[in-house]
Image (cartoon, grey):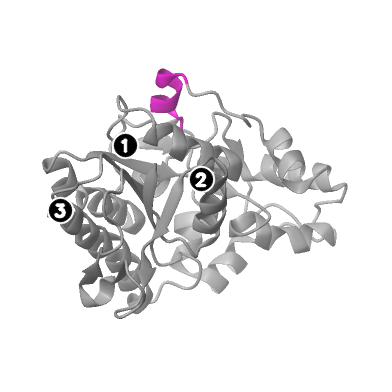
Amino acid sequence: MKILLTGASGFIGTTLTRYLRGCGHQVVALQRGNGAPTPCWEPAAGHIDLTGAEDVQAVVHLAGEPLLGRWTSRKKRRIQDSRVEGTRLLCEALAARNDRPGVLVSASAIGYYGPTGETMVDESSPPGDDFLAQVAVAWEGATQVAADHGIRVVPLRIGLVLSPEGGALAKMLTLFKMGMGGRLGTGSQWWSWIALDDLHAIILYVLNRPTISGPLNAVAPEAVTNEDFTRILAKVLKRPALIPVPAGLIKTVFGEMADATLLASSRVWPGALDTDGYEFRFSHLESALRHLLGR
């Protein structure tokens, strides 16, 4: 396939590009900047030029402002606008073409459900009402114009992506390797994770499955508590994990982001993938970490 990719310079986009090309597909990156080599876009300015993306058969949309950092009002606006307005701009441009792609896989997040506590949720569950949930609802809603013009749309509700190349795991490794790791807060919050290898495979699986449309949870079937995640990571690294990080300290450093992500309990089931028969490469956290970390 010829695949248009946004967010190609991010850690998921970079590795996904290598994976798709290794599978024999042609990847065309939608580059940032007004005046950059085409195809290019500048979502904040409402500019997009899809010259050079003619006859793409699929689009994978990953672009968005990173969540990490204190959520000032300006940061929250960038988080929302980069996802909602950027997605709307892309989808309107795709819908306006005569050579529309057959499928759009558009990143979303399990933050759609809000904090779920001990309750297991799947794609049929309602959205939450916190900031991230509101963003995810609007983010997915922005793809409607593409669906209205016959493009198969799959919003991919992505969990905690595990990779030593980026994301939360990469940031945790230094402390854990030094024996300074520990649970966050009480450690009772559920973390729904996905190995980077499975995320790559799921994206390609969805591109090739014309029967799949609508939201899809990209999480492994085995959610774990933060305390169990900490214990298993320490076991794989053969290091102690005896230094818990108090919730108050996390909130002091990260503010609202801490309650919405690091300390939030999110127990999510990959219902659509399970029903469709997708076979996870890594269903269990320990085997995923051993693979990813070469242990």
What whole-number distance in Å separates the C-alpha atoms at marks 3 and 1?
A: 24 Å
The percent position of residue 180, horizontal first and vertical second, equals 80, 61
* In-image side of 199 versus 104 (left or right): right
Asked which secondary structure carries label 2, the reply is: helix
Is there any visible trace of residue 244 in the rendered image? yes
Q: Nearer the viewer, residue 95 or 62?
A: 95
Discs 3, 1 touching: Cβ within 8 Å:
no
What whole-number distance in Å separates the C-alpha atoms at marks 1 and 2?
A: 22 Å
Disc on the earlier residue, 1 or 2? 2
The percent position of residue 160, horizontal first and vertical second, equals 54, 48
Is there any visible trace of residue 115 in the rendered image? no
Q: Determine the residue positioned at 20% across, 73% down.
A: 46
Mark 3, other Cα within 10 Å: few <14 / some 14–19 / many ≥20:
few
Asked which secondary structure carries label 3, the reply is: loop
Q: In this figure, what is the number of numbered marks?
A: 3
Decide whether residue 269 is among the magenta residues.
yes
The type of residue carrying mark 1 is Pro
Residue 215: numbered disc: 1
The type of residue carrying mark 2 is Leu
Q: Quadrant of the N terminus?
A: top left
The type of residue carrying mark 3 is Arg
> Which residue is label 2 attached to?
20
